[in-house]
Image (spheres, rainbow, N blue to C red):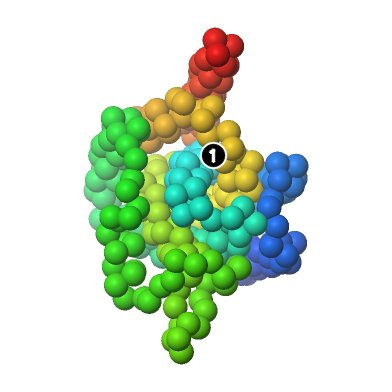
Amino acid sequence: MTVPIWAWAAVLGVILAMLAVDLLAHRRAHAVGVREALAWSAVWVALGLAFGAVIWWAWGAEFAGQYFAGYVIEKSLAVDNVFVFAIIFGYFAVPREYQHRILFYGVLGALVFRAVFIAAGSVLIASFAWILYVFGAFLVLTGIRMALHRDETVDYENNAVLRVFRRIVPATDRMHGKKFLVREAGRWVATPLLTVLVLIEVTDIVFAVDSIPAIFAVTQEPFLVFTSNAFAILGLRAMYFLLADLMHRFVYLKIGLAAVLVWVGVKMLLLDVWKIPTALSLGVVGLILATAVGASLIRTSALSRKE
């Protein structure tokens, strides 16, 4: 797959333009409601699907299938981010009207870090083909661990990242509107919003360690890996506001996401034995997620009726 420089520049231009539109649309701090989140989710999904159509037109059905497979995998794994973001915002009692601002800068940082990870991963794969098997084994083990420890909770007061941040950066426990930094007693100090942003950013880096190898399981084309990641991540904020209040309904989703990681890991391990078709891989991921969501809704609906 040959991608000219202008195509990379055009994609980056579209991403920056959409981020600017999103920032302008939310320049006034307000609580994002379900209707607004649904509208923005539709915009981001339409943008991601439209880009897949462009891939199909320019490079053919096979590369478009790889893009869509990567997009669906990243979009599904992003739901796990939503779980954690909801926990972090609740733990630090972040007002709903400031959450979009934090997530905006979190997504901006995520795009940069993921671009670095993708570049590093591409170099490793080009230099050491056997690294794919390492990625595959890592994904299988990660999926198993996710399933076994799905109910674990994190004590953020004793979080290592938070302790290091507070040791390095002076901080205040008082909110100062939407500001990340304020001056107190003649020095700059971090507000709770900056503390939460750091945790959000570190959390996404941790998740990227899982999701980037997962996408390399369906395509090793850097352009497709980056764009499928980018267009899925761009809709993360809207997804959060759409699903945050419904997280309790998806009781089996963690198991479904764990199964997705195991599946793409096995697919990677079987590369020299059987190259699983992209369409089949995408179908299996869709079936796993549909089953997890369906079973979750049936389970929680049954419990609600009993109550």
38 sits to left or right of 98: right
Tag 1's secondary structure? helix
Q: Residue at x 24, y 45 (%)?
A: 134
Q: Residue at x 40, y 43 (%)?
A: 214
Q: Position of residue 73 (x, y in %)?
A: 49, 40
Frontmost residue, 92 versus 240: 92
State the residue lying farthest toward the top: 306
Q: Is residue 108 visible?
A: no
Q: Position of residue 181 (x, y in %)?
A: 51, 76
Mark 1 sits on what residue? 72
Q: Position of residue 168 (x, y in %)?
A: 31, 76
Q: Residue at x 53, y 66 (%)?
A: 175
Give the image quarter of residue 171: bottom left
Frontmost residue, 93 versus 221: 93
Quadrant showing the C terminus = top right
Frontmost residue, 39 versus 307: 307
Give the image quarter of residue 217: top left
The kind of residue on which mark 1 rests is Val
Q: Counting other residues with Cα less than 10 Å from the Cα at mark 1, is it few (<14), some (14-19), or many (20 or more)?
A: some
Q: Position of residue 62 (x, y in %)?
A: 55, 40
Q: Is residue 188 visible?
A: yes
